[in-house]
Amino acid sequence: MARRTGGAEALVVIVISALLAATAASEAYTEMIECGNSVNDRMIMPVRREVYDEGRIYDISHRITREMPSWESTEGLGNFLWLAGSMKNGSLYNGSEMKLSTHTGTHVDAPGHVFDHYYDAGFDVDTLDLGVLNGPALLVDVPRDKNLTAEVMKSLHIPRGVKRVLFRTLNTDRGLMYKTAFDASYTGFTRDGARWLVDNTDIKLVGLDYLSVATYDDLIPSHLEFLESREIILVEGLKLDEVLAGLYTVHCLPLRLLGSDGSPIRCILIK
Ligand SMILES: *[C@@H]1O[C@H](CO)[C@@H](O)[C@H](O)[C@H]1NC(C)=O
Ligand SMILES: *[C@@H]1O[C@H](CO)[C@@H](O)[C@H](O)[C@H]1NC(C)=O
Ligand SMILES: *[C@@H]1O[C@H](CO)[C@@H](O)[C@H](O)[C@H]1NC(C)=O
């Protein structure tokens, strides 16, 4: 009995040490690989930033990703980018193609978006005034419990002369631009809020923090109020988290898409 136990114990010891040796060897090997990779990665790892130049420049555009929300979709944007030619498949270079709605992510609306005769007349994103899209801008927080009605707009006391306003709403607190499923309960301008802004302020650039500046219920009526004069430019889907409210210089540059009613846009705030 004793010998058999001893034999069994010896066997267990042998098996365990064999396992330990194997594990140690494979750990060492894995470590070597990981170490090599992490050194390499550390050397060539790209840096993705929201803020540049020690807090002087804020990127207020959302990164375009498959998971980002897309108008009225529960699935998000999906696959918008693919390699048409790839080095791994023998091409001399990696070259991608993309397919996107012109109203994807942080984007701008042209008057032709909601007025068919403006569309036909050519009021596309290429005709938008870069003088309006670039200049001093106010970032304001609005009440979180209401949409942007005439009453709310009035209560904000935005002085005459202010030409560009970015409205931070409950949408930012709710992180709606980071949720894949489209959410129709977002905060935006009601029709009377849009009309009030047109009639009582000098605002020509209206920025908001979800896919539309207008509430879902007043979608088209609000857009019509804003875009009829062709003087107001709407920037939608802005990324306004972690920027303090206040006065900045905004720079927004749409793509020169001839004939397009919208364009993805890169917007930055400079202190
Ligand atoms: C080229 O594309 C491949 C995918 O086919 C990717 O793995 C690789 O990192 C790319 N190379 C460069 C230089 O971007
Ligand atoms: C490379 O080519 C193969 C075979 O045609 C294809 O299955 C694969 O998806 C291609 N990979 C890329 C990155 O284009
Ligand atoms: C704004 O209006 C939408 C409907 O378009 C509604 O679902 C939402 O609750 C309203 N938001 C607030 C804060 O009242």
Image: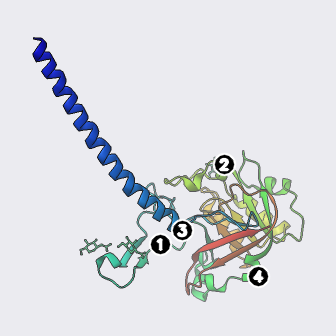
Q: CA distance from mark 4 to mark 2?
A: 30 Å
Q: Mark 2 touching mark 3, by CB under 8 A?
A: no
Report which quarter residue 135 is drawn in: bottom right
Secondary structure under tag 4 reads helix
Which amino acid, mark 4?
Answer: Gly
Which amino acid, mark 3?
Answer: Thr
On screen, 1 above or below 197? Answer: above
On screen, 93 above or below 107? Answer: below
Name the quarter where the C terminus is drawn.
bottom right
Q: Is residue 181 left or right of residue 158?
A: left
Asked if the beta carbon under badge 2 is closer than 8 A to the nearest atom of ligand 3, the reply is: no
Q: Earlier in the sequence, mark 2 or mark 3?
A: 3
Which residue is disc 3 drawn over? 104
Which residue is disc 1 drawn over? 100
Q: Position of residue 267 (x, y in %)?
A: 67, 71
Which amino acid, mark 2?
Answer: Asp
Q: CA distance from mark 3 to mark 4?
A: 23 Å
Q: Earlier in the sequence, mark 4 or mark 1?
A: 1
Which amino acid, mark 1?
Answer: Leu
Which residue is disc 2 drawn over? 173
Q: Mark 1 touching mark 3, by CB under 8 A?
A: yes
Categorize mark 2 by other alpha carbons within 10 Å: few (<14), some (14-19), many (20+): few
Q: CA distance from mark 2 to mark 3?
A: 21 Å
Q: Earlier in the sequence, mark 3 or mark 4?
A: 3
**Residue sitting at x 66%, y 48%:** 173
Which residue is disc 4 drawn over? 131
Towards the viewer: 196 or 169: 169
Q: Position of residue 72 (x, y in %)?
A: 49, 59
Asked if the beta carbon under badge 4 is closer than 8 A to the nearest atom of ligand 3, the reply is: no
Categorize mark 4 by other alpha carbons within 10 Å: few (<14), some (14-19), many (20+): few
